[in-house]
Amino acid sequence: MKPTFHHRAINSPFDDPCVYVRALREKRALLFDLGHTNRLKPADIQKITDVFVTHTHIDHFIGFDTLLRALLRRETPLRIFGPPNIIECIEGKLRGYTWNLIKEYPLKIEAFGINEKHISHAGFYAENCFNKTDYGEKPFDGTLLKEGYFEVKAACLTHQISCLGFSLEEDFHINIDKAALNSEQLGVGPWLSEFKRAVRENAGGDTEFKISGRIHTKKELMKIAMITEGQKISYVADSSMDEENIRKIITLAKDSDTLYCEAYFLEEDRERAIERHHLTAKTAGMIAREAGVKNLVVMHFSPKYRERPEAPEKEALMEYNKE
Ligand SMILES: [Zn+2]
Ligand SMILES: [Zn+2]
């Protein structure tokens, strides 16, 4: 099955967290957390349309400047979603520079700050020297972004401060049955993506497609489409190990194909993890098991384990694989 999203952590688990998600059918990518982005190629950075920041500790937000620098001349706006203080943090970053010569530049930053009940929106536009435009707030129901074929949800967590966890979920996945395509003598062509779009948008059965000079209806063509569950990727960084957080993370990550989860401390340093408001590797493993996650990727390890870099993953997977 051809996936809809390719995803990868761009830094090592001992470096600042940042996961790059490429939406393969569009020239578009999403970013979870804004650790250092220096390892991304310029062309990869240009594809980023939406950034989801868990919280604004420096290791999760330091990549903002690199992104801003690279996107100044881009027409497509950049959306940044984060905890309640993200709008003032973006404003603060932007106020750190002088912007008298950028009025001709197209970049528009749309910033969204999320709390349990509301989502606040502000815009920062180059044409306006990045001064803030306030759009007020709207009720928040858990969904940050709803696109044609996927949505991104957020859970409000704690890490002494407010912090978010994210899930990216494709509605469903359409596979084309190649054998049926051949036996029906339907040649491949641009009609296939139009047909997939019609299925996704639930178009009427009499919607027509011209294939090699002949007209076929959507209803007729449905026999070549195999509908399977969509891809789901979840991302959870720094979180306190309290029961409520753990319950919220399990709900958020339920049945994910991949969960990226912090494992800053080992269970042997549990006291320290509680004090510093982080999860242990063992807890990450338990969360993934309880949520029925298919693939757990642990990340964001304390430098104290540099001498035994495999330890956090080993501990998490041992717990994850427990019967
Ligand atoms: Zn943190
Ligand atoms: Zn961190």
Image (cartoon, rainbow, N blue to C red):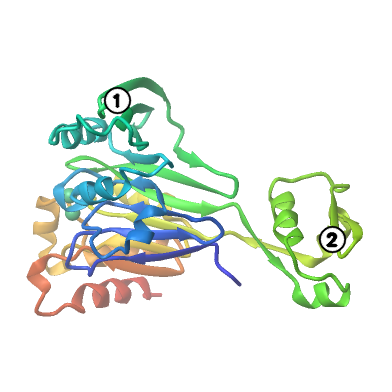
Asked whether residue 232 is in view, the answer is yes
Identify residue for label 1. Answer: 128
Q: Quadrant of residue 76?
A: top left
Give the mark nearest the N terminus, 1 or 2.
1
Q: Position of residue 202 (x, y in %)?
A: 74, 46
For badge 1, the amino acid type reads: Asn
Residue neighbourhood size for the residue with mark 1, other residues' Cα within 10 Å, grouped as few (<14), some (14–19), many (≥20): some
Q: Quadrant of residue 189?
A: bottom right
Q: Quadrant of ligand 2?
A: bottom left
Q: Position of residue 245 (x, y in %)?
A: 30, 47
Tell me the residue at 11%/73% (across/down): 305
Q: Secondary structure at mark 2?
A: helix
Tell whether 240 sits left or right of 109.
left
Asked whether residue 125 is in view, the answer is no
Q: Position of residue 197 (x, y in %)?
A: 69, 52
Residue neighbourhood size for the residue with mark 2, other residues' Cα within 10 Å, grouped as few (<14), some (14–19), many (≥20): some
Q: Nearer the viewer, residue 31 or 107?
A: 107
Tell whether 161 sits left or right of 173.
left
Q: Nearer the viewer, residue 224 or 43?
A: 43
Tell me the residue at 53%/55% (across/down): 26
User: What mark, if any, has residue 196 been given in the picture?
Assistant: none
The image quadrant where one finds the N terminus is bottom right
User: Quick check: 227 above or below 90?
Assistant: below
For badge 2, the amino acid type reads: Leu
Q: Secondary structure at mark 1?
A: helix
Tell me the residue at 37%/36% (across/down): 106
User: What mark, if any, has residue 221 been given in the picture?
Assistant: 2
Q: Nearer the viewer, residue 6 or 259?
A: 6
Task: Determine the CA span between mark 1 and mark 2.
Answer: 50 Å
